[in-house]
């Protein structure tokens, strides 16, 4: 998955409404450096991609962030609503979900930043490295919850 | 058609922001509810109120993005909202820390 080839054509799309010397000047104004200084704002790096790509990247970030918030909410609800005794057993379900939520939030920002930068430089985009570990972790928590529920019911 | 595409993309993004705002407000309501039932109302109530306000703020921020100036949209001048997204990430991490404290102490 690369934004490079598309980006070059989309840059032309992006400047479709411009023409002549004015358009060329605006293009020049929009261009940034290809190398990144530490802490340099993204908008100064490379060339701006088509706004649709920027919006799509932002929506992906927001979707991951909602996943993070949902994990935190589920962990909080599990720690408050489950009725396992002793009490620390409900934390076995709740705490991993909350920690996963925090990890997902940080990971989603790093992914957004990487992909935004990659789009501006015409480099390959990246999928989230968290998809599979997150699925495995949620499955493990679910199995633990079922096991605890069965043991609790058998008492 | 191309312009309509971009407008639709901006609208989809604004709706994504609205969903995120609602999620945040829902967690705020959870904190309020659990704060009322637990031994930690002083942690639950302020956090809940803050998150409800943050939800409203996020909705406003999203609407601002969805209403991106048409000229900027057509010319492809959309600046990445680096600081806003960074602040959302930091806020989500803080929410996780408060939820962790709430789960352990209540």
Image (spheres, grey):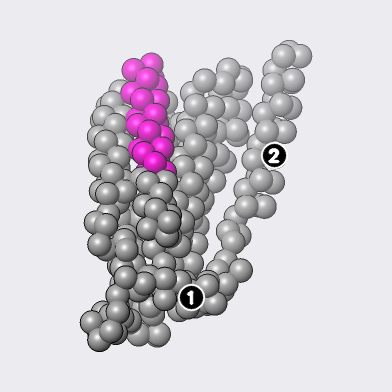
Secondary element under disc 2, as helix, strand or loop, is helix
Q: Which of the two marks, 1 or 2, is nearer to us in this view?
A: 1
Q: Which residues are magenta?
A: B15-39
Does residue B69 lie above or below A145 as drawn?
A: below
Residue at 46 percent across and 42 percent down: it is A66
Is the stretch drawn in magenta largely helix, strand or loop? helix
Q: Position of residue B66 (x, y in %)?
A: 31, 48
Q: Position of residue B5 (x, y in %)?
A: 43, 55
Contact, mark 1 vs mark 2 (Cβ under 8 Å): no
Same chain, labels 1 and 2: yes
Instruction: Give the numbered dot on residue A9.
Output: 1
Q: Chain of mark 2?
A: A
Is residue A60 visible from the viewing direction of this image? Answer: yes
Instruction: Give the numbered dot on residue A139.
Output: 2
**How far separated are the C-alphas under marks 1 and 2?**
42 Å
N-terminal label among 1 and 2: 1
Instruction: Give the numbered dot on residue B49.
Output: none
């Amino acid at each position: 998955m690369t934004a490079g080839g598309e980006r070059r054509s989309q840059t032309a799309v992006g400047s479709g409404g411009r023409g002549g010397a004015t358009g060329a000047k605006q293009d020049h104004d929009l261009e940034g450096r290809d190398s990144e200084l530490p802490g340099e704002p993204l908008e100064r790096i490379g060339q701006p991609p088509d706004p649709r790509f920027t919006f799509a990247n932002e929506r992906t970030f927001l979707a991951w962030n909602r996943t993070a918030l949902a994990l935190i909410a589920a962990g909080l609800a599990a720690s408050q609503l489950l009725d396992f005794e002793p009490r620390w057993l409900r934390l076995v379900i709740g705490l991993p979900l909350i920690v996963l939520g925090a990890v997902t939030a940080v990971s989603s920002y790093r992914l957004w930043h990487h992909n935004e930068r990659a789009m501006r430089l015409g480099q390959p985009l990246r999928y989230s490295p968290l998809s599979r570990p997150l699925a495995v972790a949620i499955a493990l928590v679910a199995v633990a919850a079922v096991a605890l529920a069965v043991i609790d019911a058998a008492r | 058609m191309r312009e309509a595409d971009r407008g639709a993309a901006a609208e989809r993004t604004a709706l994504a922001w609205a969903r995120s705002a609602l999620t945040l407000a829902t967690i705020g309501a959870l904190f309020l509810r659990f704060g009322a039932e637990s031994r930690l109302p002083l942690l639950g109530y302020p956090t809940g109120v803050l998150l409800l306000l943050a939800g409203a703020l996020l909705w406003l921020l999203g609407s601002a993005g969805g209403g991106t100036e048409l000229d900027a949209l057509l010319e492809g001048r959309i600046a990445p909202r680096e600081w806003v997204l960074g602040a959302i990430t930091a806020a989500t991490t803080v929410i996780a820390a408060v939820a962790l404290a709430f789960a352990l102490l209540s």
